[in-house]
Image (tube, rainbow, N blue to C red):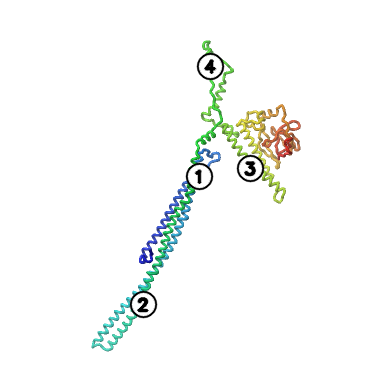
Amino acid sequence: MSWGTDLWDQFENLDKHTQWGIDFLERYAKFVKERLEIEQTYAKQLRNLVKKYCPKRSKDEEPRFTSCLSFYSILNELNDYAGQREVVAEEMGHRVYGELMRYSLDLKAERKHHLQEGRKAQQYLDQCWKQMDNSKKKFERECREAEKCQIVFEKLDNDINATKSEVEKAKSQLYLRTHTADESKNEYAAQLQNFNGEQWKHFNAAIPQIFKNLQDMDERRTVKLGETYRSFAEVERKVIPIISKCLEGMVTAAKNVDQRRDSAIVVESFKSGFEPPGDFPFEDFSQNIQRTGSDGTIGTPKNDTGKPDPKHSIAKAKNKLWLFGKKPKAPNLEDLSHLPPEQRRKKLQQRIDELSRELQKEMDQRDALNKMKDVYEKNPQMGDPSSLQPKISETICNMEKLRSEIHKNESWLTEVEGKQSSRGDRRPSGDVNHHAPHGRESPEGSYTDDPSQEHRSPPQPDPHEFDDEFEDDDPLPAVGHCKALYSFDGSNEGTLVMKEDEVLYVIEEDKGDGWTRVRKQSGEEGYVPTSYVEITMEKHSKGAVTYI
């Protein structure tokens, strides 16, 4: 069916229909816009919800319970789900709404063009009809005038009283009118023929073509609507696999909840390591009461050796009561001795791991600087080797500080775990700060005035500690010897004064804390910085080893 042939006389209705079609398309576009705004709002609200229940946490506050981890996994999946809703909104805006609005503008321009052509064709046909109608009216008017002239002529011609001049004048007027009527007739016939031709062209060629163009335009509009309906659904279908993965992730997170694991974490988190308190001893306050002979056998016999110390028992019991009541507040000590044993062990291990990672970074930086220094020494044009020395010294100092901290924390950890080294067994156990492995204390970091070298301040031990250690009956055997590369003042207790190029005996190697135990020819012993001496080990060493 064709609009051009079947609807040749429905120009106004087609005008209204095409306008309705464009309005409907824009209405659908508005629907899509509101839909994508709903998606955007929904995604935004989901992200805000996730952000609300996923606050920023420090590393120590990271959740470890499987229920918490699963919940945060669900929040992550929900955040990804919100991202897919944003994708839906974006694709709808680009592939559907934006396309519809651009197409609507094109339809309006095309419809306007076709309707203008139809109106021009109608105006031209109306103009042809007016010309034909004017020629028709003129022909009709001229015929009436000619008829009047003929009646006048016939009346005068039959009147015997009329003069010849009057008759001739009437005859001449009749001839003129008749001639004019004939010309009007010919003009009317020509205009009529022209109008009929233009009218045929109008209703059989021009209008059908214009209406056909409008029909094609409207059909393309319908096809475009169908395509956008499909795109509307495809946008949603495209994200379904990813949304399904998000939902599967939520289900997996739910399956990962393990009540036994959470219970074990609770034990691990709060286990103190203390033993449960023992029974309270019986405190007999009737010991000093004079008893008669009859009831003497009933009373508790006086036995000073078996008498408990009430003050000691009560004090010991009070020290344990906090396990069942409110725990007393304790200051945050560096050695974490205010924590229960199990918690202290975990914290110390974490601290040692962190310090070890920092030490490794410093060692990598030192190696890189040394390599760069070697390159500068071989190729002076690339840079000044001495410019790297301050940075190298600073890095070495940082390494010594970190080694000292690691050594100190390892000693505390050893104390907690109840492990003592062979030399540590001879040392007093009063102060946890002096339970260093291998019977040595970790020195604190300090700098030397010489920018090319660095050392740490000597150990600060318990006075009784060194007394016990150096008062052994047999001195330690020498395991090697060393030569002093620099002078060392040995101003702190436990260290040894040495001069440059002085030769000393090595009686204990560096255990990783930057200090070596040596003995002078006179028998005096103490610690010196390992980086200040060139050590040559005996027997088991394959050659001289220099620590710098």
| Distance of label 4 from label 1 (alpha carbons) | 71 Å
Mark whose residue sits in front, 4 or 3: 3
Mark whose residue sits in front, 4 or 1: 1
Q: Dot 4: few (<14), some (14–19), or many (≥20) neighbours within 10 Å?
A: few
Label 3 or label 2, whichever comes before in sequence order: 2
Residue at the image position 53 percent from the left and 10 percent from the top: 293
Label 4 or label 3, whichever comes before in sequence order: 4
Which residue occupies the extreme front position in the image? Answer: 1
Q: Quadrant location of residue 420?
A: top right
Residue at the image position 63 percent from the left and 34 percent from the top: 410
| Residue pointed to by mark 2 | 190
Q: Residue 460: in sight, yes or no?
A: no
SS for tag 1? helix
Report the quarter where the C terminus lies: top right
| Residue pointed to by mark 4 | 286
- The spot of residue 123 in percent (x, y) is 38, 70
| Residue pointed to by mark 3 | 361
When the figure is inspected, residue 156 is found, relative to residue 265, above or below; the finding is: below
Label 4 or label 1, whichever comes before in sequence order: 1
